[in-house]
Amino acid sequence: MFVARGQQTRVTLAEAAAQTAQSEVRTLEALAQRVRQVAEKAPRDPHENKSLELALAETVATTLERRISDAISIETVSVTTGGGVTRVSPVAEMARPVPLSGGQLRAVSLRIKGTYGHYQGLRDYVASFLSLPVAVTSFNASDRSFELTLAVFGS
């Protein structure tokens, strides 16, 4: 009798563990479903799959469009290689792969040199690039002159 009772206790414990595991599985499945629903409704990155050429064109357009309203005078806008050397080459030849992107993302450097009329205009000018697929990699301002280097990203 004692052995049967011990086995019955083990069976009961195993059934309880199985029910707990099934309950946890249902909870995880419900959570996964909720995550999928939220992900489907999440806004997409407007720059996802944007070509590097288009991203560069939009960045240059912003560079030129914002200069008047922000009291900026542009001296030069140049696409540079990683070493800072300006070349006249197709964008694809100048682009460098972005690490950890699996080759899906490339970048070029855009150097902007100019002068600014007032500090707030310079701040607004630099802020205008926030909506683009760029990162500020270098910025220097002195005596109303500035040099801004952006990494422009695209596929």
Image (cartoon, rainbow, N blue to C red):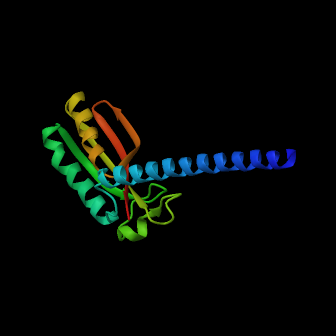
Above or below for 123 versus 10: above
Is 155 drawn above or below residue 65 in the view shown?
below
Q: In this view, does 18 lie to the left or right of 124?
A: right
Left or right side of 28 for 80: left
Please state which of residues 109 and 46 is positioned toward the viewer in this rendering.
46
Q: Residue 82: x and y, percent? A: 47, 57
Identity of the residue drawn at 24% across and 28% down: 119
Residue 129 lies, in percent from the top left, at 28, 45
Q: In which quarter of the image is residue 84?
A: bottom left
Query: Residue at the left extreme?
Result: 69
In the rendered view, would you say 70 is above or below 33? above
Q: In which quarter of the image is the C terminus?
A: bottom left
Q: Residue at x 24, y 39 (%)?
A: 125
Q: Where is residue 98 in the image (x, y as percent from the top left)?
A: 48, 58
The number of numbered discs placed on residues in the rendered structure image is: 0
Residue 44 appears in the figure = no
Furthest residue in direction front, as rendered: 1
Residue 80 visible at all: yes
Left or right, 134 with respect to 128, comes to right
Tell which of 105 and 39 is nearer to you.
39
Whole-percent x, y for residue 13 in the image:
71, 45
| Residue drawn 66% across the image and 47% down it | 17
Residue at 55% x, 47% y is 24
